[in-house]
Image (cartoon, rainbow, N blue to C red):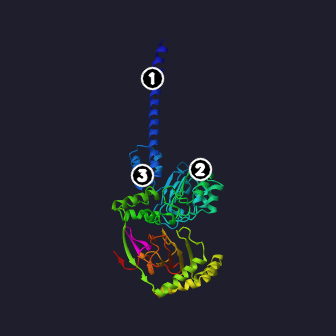
């Protein structure tokens, strides 16, 4: 009995010790789970948040956690050690986050990093001037690569050698839809890839390319800025000729989305978009914001006028005869279908056509020379009209656009290297059918070109003002596409009449 009595208290003491130990282990496990949750939260903020201030705050919070010993050493791997004292051990491998963001680098080298390449989990090279990453293949454990806002024309071939790479941010580069890009991404897909950001690469813009990538990489989230076909609401009408030229939106459509955003900031005082924050809104939203700002100012922009320089009557008569003869020769002739016109022909100067033929020997160059020869008398009459106003330009212009029934069609001449001259002839009413061009964000000028030559810079948005379309309106546009690019200074070169 005595033995049994002694054993009972001993057993009870052992059970109590076990309970204490279990409680301790339970507390430690609970604390460890809490630490891991906190670690994950900090990691997510540091890795995934696009805002630098949030990433920095997370980094500072992680350092404070370490300093106060609230979490174990597991969280230390998200804080970069600027002065490592030893090479990473096997246990520490693949836990380093390296950021070389916004250092204006044109070249990258592994010597810039203090860690062993195999220890790097994430690499941020965004906001630099890089086009290649030597030594990338040595980062065998890399999970995330950020090369946003650089100068890559193609993705590094060494991506194939990174079996754990899950996230690539290659937005805002100069990537293009080449066979090499498709082969790299689709022939032997990167085994761990989960997210691929290709947004705002101007040469990667078609829905068909996105469809190919999406079907080839069904488990990857692919982000791409598609502008062809344009997203819903991005544009009205498929071409300048389809748009109502009197609508403000039609007059703004020639601008790029970047230029529209710039106008919101510079003209209407909106906050500029950060290069480091979330992506800016798309074209449809930007256009909506801009039209709302214009609506606050009134229904229309201010319209002023200017007069071109008159062409002598005897020269006008010669030009009109040649235009009527040209119209009779060509029943239907439309070389610029994006523009609304019953007839549109482009004549190249013989010098320009011959130079292109020598350079590329193309059929188009031969065709341009034949067309020039067939319309030589029209070219000479037009040149005489030009010489009556500007003799120097008469010997310089490299192209002549000949039109009949040109209507509206707000556009920008992207291939011109300087201002052009415009002349219109016909029985339409004087003071109508002039060239309307944007002087500034709030003002449009109509240049009267009937029997006159008006000088306008077509690199600003412009279109033909309204006129009675039952009447005849011919036009000649004298322009430059070869030679030294002239500064873009002002839209109209004649006197402005308020």
Q: Residue 196 is drawn in which quadrant?
A: bottom right
Q: Residue 291 is drawn in which quadrant?
A: bottom left
- Which comes sooner in the sequence, label 1 or label 2? 1
Mark 1 Cα shell of 10 Å, populated few (<14), some (14-19), many (≥20)? few
Depth check: give the residue in front, 442 or 44.
442
Which residue in the protein does label 1 denote?
Answer: 13
* Residue range (magenta): 431-446
Mark 3 Cα shell of 10 Å, populated few (<14), some (14-19), many (≥20)? some
Residue positioned 54% across, 67% down in the render: 338
Residue 34 place in picture, x, y as percent: 44, 39
Q: Are marks 3 and 1 in contact (CB under 8 Å)?
A: no
Q: How many marks?
A: 3
- Which comes sooner in the sequence, label 3 or label 1? 1
Residue 370 place in picture, x, y as percent: 63, 81
Q: Nearer the viewer, mark 2 or mark 3?
A: 2
Q: Residue 24 is drawn in which quadrant?
A: top left
Depth check: give the residue in front, 183 or 418.
418
Depth check: give the residue in front, 302 or 457.
302
Which residue in the protein does label 3 denote?
Answer: 59
Q: Judge from the rendering whether residue 50 lies leftward or rightward of residue 110; answer left or right.
A: left
Residue 307 place in picture, x, y as percent: 40, 79
Which residue in the protein does label 2 denote?
Answer: 192
């Amino acid at each position: 009995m005595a033995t049994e009595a002694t054993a009972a208290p001993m057993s009870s003491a052992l059970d109590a010790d076990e309970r204490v130990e279990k409680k301790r282990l339970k507390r430690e496990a609970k604390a460890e789970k809490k630490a891991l949750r906190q670690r994950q939260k900090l990691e997510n903020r540091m890795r995934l948040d696009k805002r630098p201030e949030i990433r920095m705050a997370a980094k500072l919070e992680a350092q404070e956690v370490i300093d106060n010993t609230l979490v174990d050493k597991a969280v230390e791997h998200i804080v970069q050690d600027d002065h490592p004292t030893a090479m990473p051990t096997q246990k520490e491998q693949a836990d380093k986050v390296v950021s070389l963001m916004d250092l204006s680098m044109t070249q990258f080298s592994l010597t810039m990093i203090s860690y062993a390449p195999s220890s790097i989990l994430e690499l941020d090279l965004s906001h630099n001037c890089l086009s290649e990453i030597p030594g990338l293949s040595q980062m065998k454990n890399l999970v995330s690569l950020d090369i946003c806002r650089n100068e890559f024309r193609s993705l590094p071939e060494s991506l194939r050698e990174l079996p754990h790479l899950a996230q690539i941010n290659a937005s805002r580069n100069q990537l293009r839809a080449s066979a090499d890009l498709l082969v790299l991404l689709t022939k032997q897909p990167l085994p761990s890839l989960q997210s691929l950001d290709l947004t705002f690469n101007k040469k990667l813009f078609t829905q068909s390319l996105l469809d190919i990538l999406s079907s080839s990489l069904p488990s990857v989230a692919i982000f791409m800025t598609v502008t062809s076909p344009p997203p819903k609401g991005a544009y009205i009408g498929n071409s300048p000729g389809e748009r109502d030229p009197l609508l403000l939106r039609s007059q703004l459509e020639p601008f790029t989305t970047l230029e529209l955003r710039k106008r919101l900031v510079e003209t209407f005082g909106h906050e500029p978009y950060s290069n480091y924050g979330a992506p800016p809104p798309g074209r449809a939203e930007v256009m909506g914001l801009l039209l709302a700002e214009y609506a606050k100012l009134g229904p229309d922009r201010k319209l002023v006028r200017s007069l071109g320089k008159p062409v002598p009557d005897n020269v006008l008569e010669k030009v009109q005869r040649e235009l009527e003869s040209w119209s009779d020769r060509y029943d239907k002739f439309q070389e610029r279908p994006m523009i609304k016109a019953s007839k549109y022909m482009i004549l190249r100067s013989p010098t320009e056509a011959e130079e292109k033929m020598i350079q590329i020997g193309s059929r188009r160059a031969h065709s341009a020379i034949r067309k020039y020869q067939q319309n030589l008398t029209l070219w000479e009459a037009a040149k005489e009209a030009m010489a009556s106003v500007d003799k120097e330009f008469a010997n310089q212009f490299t192209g002549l656009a000949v039109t009949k029934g040109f209507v509206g069609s707000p556009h920008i001449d992207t291939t011109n290297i300087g201002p052009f001259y415009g002349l219109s002839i016909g029985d339409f009413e004087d003071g109508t059918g002039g060239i309307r061009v944007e002087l500034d964000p709030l003002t449009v000028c109509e240049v009267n070109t009937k029997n006159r030559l008006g000088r306008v810079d077509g690199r600003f948005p412009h279109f033909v003002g309204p006129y009675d379309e039952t009447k005849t309106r011919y036009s000649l546009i004298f322009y430059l596409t070869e030679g030294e690019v002239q500064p873009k200074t002002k839209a109209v070169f004649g006197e402005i009449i308020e």
